[in-house]
Image (spheres, coloured by chain):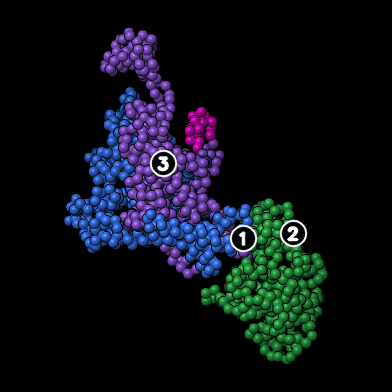
Amino acid sequence: MSLAGSLMTGLMLAWVLGGTVWLLTTRTYRITQVGRFAMDLLGFPVELTQSLFGRGGVPYALLLPNMAIFGLFTFAPMILNFYVSFTGGSSIILFERPWVGWEKYGDIFSCENFLEPRTCENAGYNFFTGLYNTLWFVVIQVPIMCSVALLTAIVVNRDIKGRGFWRAMFFYPVMLSPVVIANIWNWVLHRKGVLNETLDGATGALNALAGLSGFDMVMTVSLAVILMVVTERALRSASEPSTAWTGVFAVILTLLTAWANPLSLLGLSGSFWLGLALGLFLVWLVASGKSAARTAIMGAAFLAAVMLLSIQFSTVFDLGSYRPNNWLVTPNTGWPFFWLVFVFCWSHMGFYMLILLAGLQAIPRDLYEAAKMDATRPWRAFTRITLPLVMPTLTVVIILSLIRSFQIFDEVYLLTGGGPGRETYMIVQNIYEVAFTDSSPDYGQAAAGSVLMAAIIAIFTFGQLWLTRRQSDL
Amino acid sequence: MTDQTHALELKQIRKSFGKVDVIHGIDLAIEEGEFVVFVGPSGCGKSTLLRLIAGLDDPTSGDILLQGKRVNGIPAAERGLSMVFQSYALYPHMNVRANLSFGLENMNMPRAEITQRVDDAARLLQIDQLMDRRPGQLSGGQRQRVAIGRAIVREPVIFLFDEPLSNLDAELRLQMRVEISNLHAQLGNTMIYVTHDQVEAMTMADRIVVLRGGRIEQMGKPLDLYNAPANKFVAGFIGAPQMNFLKGSLAGRTVTLDCGLTKEVPLAEEAQGPVTLGVRPEAIEVSLDGAGDAQVKVQNFEQLGAITYIYTAFDNGETLTVQLPRQIPLTRGQSIGIGIDPAHVHLFHGPEERALGMAR
Amino acid sequence: MTMPHGHSIPPGGPMRRLTRFLTRTSGRGDSAQGFGVTDVLAYSYLAFGVLIVLVPVLWTFFTSIKPERQVENFDTRLLPYSQIEEEIAGVGTRDLWIFDDGTGEEQLVFKAGPTRSVTDVATPENPDEVFGVPRETLEPLEEVRVAVENYLDPILKRNGQENFHFATYLFNSVFVTVVATLITLLINAMAGFALSKYRFRGRLTFTILIVATLLIPASIILVSLFFVVWSFGIFGSLWGVIIPAAATPTGVFLLRQYMLTIPDELLEAARMDAASEWRIFWRIIIPLSLPALSVLAILSVIWRWNDFLWPLIVLISDPSAHTLQLGLTQFAGEFNTDFHYILAMTVVTLLPITLVFVWLQRFITTGIATTGLK
């Protein structure tokens, strides 16, 4: 029997026997009070503390089990991490490990150029590849997930039907395990999976549509009608343009810009982004109640009409044949990374949405009613009421998701295994592989990596706390 | 100090929370069967004092004696007291019966006796129909009764009440006041009752202890406190509407008030210097034709039928409230004459505004 | 409905009425009457989001009830189709096909030879009368059938599917989840009680320590936790998974915050009622903290049921100690091509937690939103 096993058995025996004797001598129990006796026995150490040291000793007894586990399995390992990172060899008996000083750190920092993992030796190459991938992942994923979560929370917080249903639906993926999520998405993203199939079908359908005679004409006319209606609606309200309709207008504008591709005249690509920027700018103008909004919408409508006339829809929608994409395996496409971010957001967004929703619901409704009485624009209400008041919650959410996504492992390991190549190789995977899957595990190396990772997370967390020090309520 | 044992005796009790002194050395003895009310404004230390007696807090220094036995450091449950809390503190997840029997079960009392006591208490308080309900399903008054019932079943030597009526509406408060008085008459136990409401103190107490800032200002029978307040604070605290206070100076037995009035007062001893004259609203006589000691202007008045309250002001701005036991015709701004009976005035003097003795 | 323009009293022409009809929705999303464009945007956003959430899961489910052949061919039709077989005298069991000779007349046939551009077929009634038909004229004769064997084979260890020890995995997962949750609830509640209802030396220090642990990511102590767990001798056993994470800082914090709202007078009343501190804990505090405790219970169940990395490290070497998650990983790794089995077992793994969610969803979401982390 192991050390811990015999210790635990001894403790249990002492607890049960000692407790029974003590309880039966100090109190009387009837036969029917077995339940009460069991509970008293469970809390026997607390009872004993109270009778020995009075009420003052009780909180320490209550804290003991929790703090003991914290101490042994959280704080002690934290300290131990430093020690292990200074030792070498593959022994798992602590005092048999030789002291090697800074060697393990030296192995990691063996690079000629720290920004270029290729110039490092093996340990450093793996570490820095993982580190940069993880940093990229955090920098891209956290803002996306937090904004999607905030947006979803705001939408769900609206006065909509079936609020509970929507909330539950968005939360559901949080309940699923990484293995299940990986299997599901592996199947969806398979080369012959449903995503490729759907895209293939959509391409086929669009091609078939574009091939119809008169398609150009029909598209132009119907888009022109839609554009007119939307413009009219956006400008209809007597004093100020409507934000929501301007949003719809912006979407159409973006699409038209992307299709008309005006930048190609200058030999540049990226018309879509230009359109998106234009649309967002327009929405911002209207939402913040700028006086130029009305003129801007009319100008944009004119621009849209010109672009509409220049578009050859039959070529826009003629996409050619679709080649199925091996989403998670093809190197140098960025898709594996993209799907990682996507799946991670997919599976975690609901949790942060719920927390943000709680923050939003804590904002008194009267504030919005008062703002409405003051004729506040929705955007202004958002930036001046919602955002400041939800900021403490948002800070908590950002910090939690930051810490969480720094540790990404399960999803990567199961979806891509770090591949293709090392495109999605994350830092926790590096630690895990160095310590647990190598034929000669290098615990010192892994511990050194952990210490460095802890330092980086600490910098990020405190940086975030410092940036939002006024709002944080952690 | 006699060697007779009191139901409760406090000796030089002090209590401080950190650096803040809340109780500054209180000496008090309470006799068997007495109904004592601690009264004072909020923050005067009356609740803290009660918690020290109950054993929920320990005094920083001083002794607490229950029936002559020192009980410092003895846990609350073993002092044989029971307490009715301000919020009632009924266990919300237990029904009324479980609420009443919880304490008795903890003391390992035989089940038959528990049932006996709980049923007796329920009958006494007329809550027998509510035994299976939870506190959340009871009205304020019913909760109050259950809280008292929980105190009764333990058959304590002393009942402690911590502002038990402050969460009730005015009508219920009146009713429960009477019931608690009746209960005291019925059970004959010693009761200590904390309140900030002087009406409760006046109506229920055998003896009132007025506290301020952690010190006892005065203790005595309700009417003694009313008729002979020891200082200006007690005079102002006891009685509603409040006693009128007029500033002035004393020379011998003659008071000259700032409002212009001069009065001969039956002082036991002659004295000099600035004083405050206190006179209760019902000790002032009014004449509509302007006769009397002085003229005041009517600012406002309340006709209650049996009683009329008149709020008046002197020319120098000092106000005077008058309570008349009859109806009179009044208009705002009207000048009326007032008469103050020197036999009913109080004079307060010195830094602590102690009352000067009268020859009565 | 108020008209935004003062002059627009409709003259009543048909065209006018049409435009009014087309643009009738109120332009202001915040207007009380009608269904504004913001509502449309909101609902489309929600519907789109739910589609993204649900489609992959439903797709997995629908695939998992398809027969092996349909899955292997990546047949993306929604319903599970399987080809009808028939026992043909003198030939054996063969798949049935529909032969359409171009005249619209259809005939049931089976393939009498290998599939070529002109395939030899015969009718079941006349198995000896073989005739050649073009391959494109043959359609499989199919019926809708739920492929329960995808589930039953691995669970009952039939058809060579002996590597998924479902009962063992399920037991291990349930054991870890239940025991760990019970321990977590008990010790976290005790700690939360101490930190919320007692004044004692070191209270602030303990609270700060616990909040600090909230910010320490588990994966940075992976290596040294392995050393600690190893030296305690619980490495490789389920206890090595249960114990280290039992003292959750989130739980302590959540319960402490909740217990702060329980009035102190209740505790004092209980003390007057001669209840010991431990009895106050389980007779007063525990029943009154049930809302927070159940939220923590749900969180703990989610964490433990879905836990992956730490069980992977601690339990991987002993297949009899694998949890469902580990078993499923191993299974998916070994049989990379048997998607019908993998997906069926995936559904089996996600089913318990889904059922719990469907049963308790309102409670879970409102509970986490109101009590969770705030």
Q: Are marks 2 and 1 on the same chain?
A: no
Q: Which x, y percent locates residue C30?
A: 51, 45
Mark 3 falls within which chain? C
Chain for numbered disc 2: B
Split into 4 quadrants, where in the image is the N terminus of chain B? bottom right
Disc 2 crowd, CA 10 A, few/some/many (<14, 14-19, 20+): some
Task: Please give the label number shown on residue A28.
Answer: 1
* Label 2 vs label 1, nearer the camera: 1
> Is A367 situated left or right of A340 in this image?
right
> Which residue lies under the disc numbered 2?
B120
Q: Which residue does the image show at 68% across and 73% down from the upper left?
A: B38
Which residue is at the front of the view, A22 or B190?
A22
Q: Which chain is purple?
A: C
Q: Is residue A313 visible?
A: no
**Color used for chain A?**
blue
Quadrant location of the C terminus of chain B in the rendered image: bottom right
Chain hosting mark 1: A
In the rendered view, tell whether residue A212 sits above or below residue C107. Answer: below
Q: In x, y percent, where is residue B170?
A: 71, 62
Answer with the quarter of the image where residue C110 lies.
Answer: top left
Q: Residue at (63%, 76%) from the top-left corner? A: B70
Q: In the rendered view, tell whether residue C65 sits above or below residue A35.
A: above
Span shown in magenta: C10-30
Amino acid type at mark 3: Thr
> Residue C75 vs residue C180: left or right?
left
- Residue corresponding to mark 3: C168
- Three-letter code, disc 1: Thr
Judging depth in this view, the residue of B180 and C110 nearest the camera is C110
Report which colour depicts chain B: green
In the picture, measured across the screen, residue B248 lies left or right of residue C73, that is right
